[in-house]
């Protein structure tokens, strides 16, 4: 009898372990969430690796001056916000943006990617609030630290991170690498910018907060509207 009970216990533990493994695998696959296809042929470069053509230095108070060196776009740390914004209007809906960024100094966001959402705009914050916050700002009047898109991640200095955003009428989705960070259904949600100087980043901009960053491989592509 004792042996039977031990066998049943071992069998139950094995079943529970298998179910937990399957659940973890499914969760990992869902988290990937079909990140943008980097091999697609219709991407358009937003940075030529030589100059700031197509971009303007965002006139934040106390900003540092972005520059291009060795094919990379450098945004040095300023007194607060520093960054660039696009001079040519991007699509307002049905598009994907992707870039690679790394933090070289500082302890706050090294990429605040502002993008259109229809007639409004929104920002994907990467590395805020002391270096780890990820999320959208703003949703229903709440910034990235307050709404349900908030997540946390450790970002190492001098490590490249692929940052991607997809905007459709139904959703705003974001990824870091292959990991999906935001999957926000936007029906009946108020999508807007956080009030303040970050609004200078529209219509498409990248900003840092008291942090130095390096960017490369900035590109965008339009998506076919869902039928």
Image (tube, grey):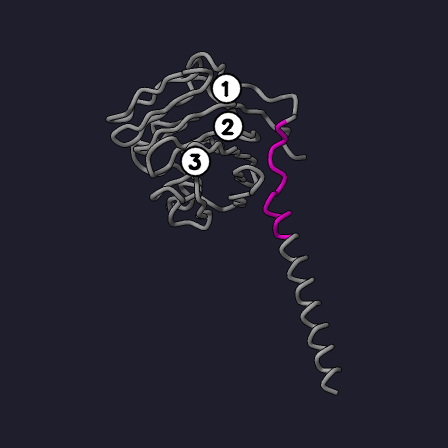
Q: Is residue 27 magenta?
A: yes
- Residue 203 in view in this figure: no
Left or right? Give the position of 164 relative to 26: left
Residue 46, numbered circle: 1
Give the x, y percent position of residue 90: 49, 23
Residue 78, numbered circle: none
Classify 68 as above or below 103: above
Q: Pointer 3: residues within 10 angstroms few (<14), some, or many (20+)? A: many
- Residue 13 in view in this figure: yes
Q: Residue at x 52, y 25 (%)?
A: 91
Q: Residue at x 40, y 44 (%)?
A: 132
Q: Which residues are magenta?
A: 26-38
Mark 3 vs 1: CB contact within 8 A: no
As helix, strand or loop, the secondary structure at mark 2 comes to: strand
Q: Nearer the viewer, residue 21 or 37?
A: 21
Say which residue label 3 marks: 122
Left or right? Give the position of 6 relative to 156: right
Going from N to C along the chain, the mark reached first, 2 or 1, is 1
Q: Residue at x 45, y 48 (%)?
A: 151
Left or right? Give the position of 131 relative to 179: left
The residue mark sitting in front, 3 or 1, is 1
C-alpha span from label 3 to label 1: 19 Å
Going from N to C along the chain, the mark reached first, 3 or 1, is 1
Give the x, y percent position of residue 101: 46, 30
């Amino acid at each position: 009898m004792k042996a039977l009970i031990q066998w049943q216990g071992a069998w139950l533990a094995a079943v529970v372990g298998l179910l937990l493994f399957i659940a973890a695998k499914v969760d990992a696959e869902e988290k990937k969430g079909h990140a943008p296809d980097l091999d697609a042929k219709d991407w358009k470069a937003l940075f030529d690796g030589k100059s700031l053509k197509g971009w303007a230095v965002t006139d934040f108070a106390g900003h540092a001056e972005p520059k291009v060196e060795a094919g990379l776009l450098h945004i040095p740390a300023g007194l607060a916000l520093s960054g660039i914004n696009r001079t040519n209007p991007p699509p307002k809906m049905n598009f994907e943006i992707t870039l690679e960024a790394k933090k070289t100094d500082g302890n706050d966001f090294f990429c605040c990617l502002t993008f259109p959402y229809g007639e409004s705009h929104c920002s994907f914050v990467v590395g805020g609030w002391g270096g780890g916050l990820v999320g959208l700002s703003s949703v229903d009047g709440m910034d990235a630290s307050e709404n349900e898109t908030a997540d946390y991640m450790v970002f190492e200095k001098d490590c490249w991170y692929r940052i991607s955003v997809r905007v459709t009428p139904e959703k705003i989705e974001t990824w870091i690498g292959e990991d999906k960070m935001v999957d926000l259904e936007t029906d009946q949600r108020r999508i807007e910018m956080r009030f303040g100087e970050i609004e200078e980043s529209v219509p498409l901009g990248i900003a840092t907060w008291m942090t130095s960053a390096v960017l490369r491989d900035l590109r965008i592509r339009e998506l076919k509207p869902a039928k």
